[in-house]
Amino acid sequence: MSQPWQAQVFVKWNKKWPTKWAQSKTWDWLNEWPEVKTAWSTMGEWDFVMWVEAPSPEALEKFVCEKLWSTDWIEKTETHWAREVWNKKAA
């Protein structure tokens, strides 16, 4: 079985960010996106970063371009893609 593609998707939200999420401090809505494995709050330019896993670069691109960008609260994103090609434990 090949390793999945992974990405860190940094997100900056706009003024349409749902205040109910900010007020409740819950991130359970991410359960609706099975591609997202974990999310982290960040300091600086970005509001949070998601660790996303998918079977192919096309699937990751579809998640970012179709699912994430279909929300109305995204100002900008930056994606860093990676796929494990070697692991000392596996060698």
Image (spheres, rainbow, N blue to C red):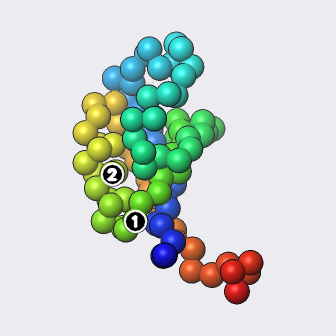
User: Residue at horizontal 47%, vertical 20%?
Assistant: 21
User: Residue at horizontal 45%, vertical 42%?
Assistant: 11
Drawn side of residue 18 relative to residue 81, left or right = left
Q: Nearer the viewer, residue 91 or 59?
A: 91
Q: Nearer the viewer, residue 72 or 75?
A: 72
Residue 36: give its label: none
Q: Is residue 10 visible?
A: no
**In front: label 1 or label 2:** 1
Q: Is residue 69 visible?
A: yes
Circle count: 2
Q: Disc 2 marks which amino acid? A: Phe
Residue 59 image position (x, y, % from top left):
32, 61
Q: What separation in Å lies between label 1 and label 2 (alpha carbons)?
A: 11 Å
Residue with the most extreme right position: 89
Instruction: Tell me the element at label 1.
Output: loop
Q: Is residue 91 above or below residue 72?
A: below
Q: Is residue 18 above or below residue 57?
A: above
Residue ID for mark 2: 63
Q: Disc 1 marks which amino acid? A: Pro
User: Residue at horizontal 48%, vertical 76%?
Assistant: 2
The quarter of the image holding the C terminus is: bottom right
Instruction: Tell me the element at label 2.
Output: helix
N-terminal of the two: label 1 or label 2?
A: 1
Residue 75 lies in quadrant: top left
Residue 28 image position (x, y, % from top left):
50, 28
Residue ID for mark 1: 55
